[in-house]
Amino acid sequence: MRKLVFATNNAHKLEEIRAILGNKVEVLSLNDISCHADIPETADTLEGNAALKAQYIYEHYGLDCFADDTGLEVEALGGAPGVYSARYAGGEGHDSEANMKKLLKELEGGNDRRAQFRTVICLIEDGKEHFFEGIVKGGIIEEKRGASGFGYDPVFVPEGYEETFAEMGGEEKNRISHRARAVRQLCSYLDK
């Protein structure tokens, strides 16, 4: 079976990706290859961050790999938080609660709550980069709902649904999510 390293330390993402890819590819984590580096995400675009992470693994370990970066892009905020979604509220690490609180505060009283989640995957295979993108349009609700998922899932309702990502089961979210859409493109490419 083909092996690919997924350049992430995020256990939720790893689980999601493995569920979506099923048994088509053996997905190795950074832990599986003994990579404990804090890979910098210093680019100012999702594409740039995905490429930085994938390049790091390819250059240091010589393994085919892929990395993703995801951003929540809110219309009324000019596309913010975007590439800064994970650290929107500032501080160290990824504080989802603080990020959601800041987002809801900034949208308070506004009517335009349109938003989209966008995931970009960079695959490096035999030294060549390939990019795949998945987008889910939707909106930001006024207060958190649901307990599953992670990140902004409790405040994002995808178009055509009443539930937030956090209220959906993992199976349903994995079927329609931005990451699932990008991963399906990756799968189609890998199947060729």
Image (cartoon, rainbow, N blue to C red):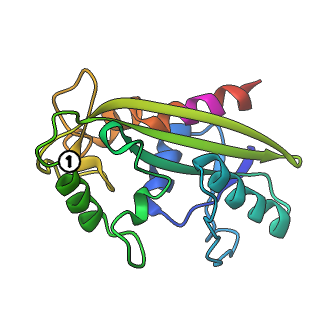
- Which amino acid type is marked by label 1? Leu
Q: Reply yes or no: does residue 118 show up in magenta.
A: no
* Residue furthest top in the image: 160
- Give the x, y percent position of residue 55: 77, 58
Mark 1 is surrounded, within 10 Å at the Cα level, by few (under 14), some (14 to 19) or many (20 or more) other residues, namely some
Question: What type of secondary structure mainly makes up the magenta span?
Answer: helix
* Viewer-side residue, 33 vs 80: 80
The residue indicated by pointer 1 is 107
Indicate left or right for 26 with 153 as reference: right
Indicate left or right for 44 with 179 as reference: right
Give the residue drawn at x 24%, y 51%. Answer: 148
Magenta range: 182-186
- Give the x, y percent position of residue 129: 80, 43
38 to 158, vertically: above or below: below
- Residue 22 visible at all: no
- Give the x, y percent position of residue 117: 41, 39
Q: How many marks?
A: 1
Q: Quadrant of the N terminus?
A: top right
* Residue furthest right in the image: 126
Q: Quadrant of the C terminus?
A: top right
* Viewer-side residue, 84 vs 36: 84
Per the image, label 1 sits on a secondary structure element best described as: helix
- Give the x, y percent position of residue 111: 16, 34
Give the residue drawn at x 58%, y 42%. Answer: 120
* Viewer-side residue, 14 vs 150: 150
* Viewer-side residue, 30 vs 87: 87
Give the residue drawn at x 40%, y 35%. Answer: 177
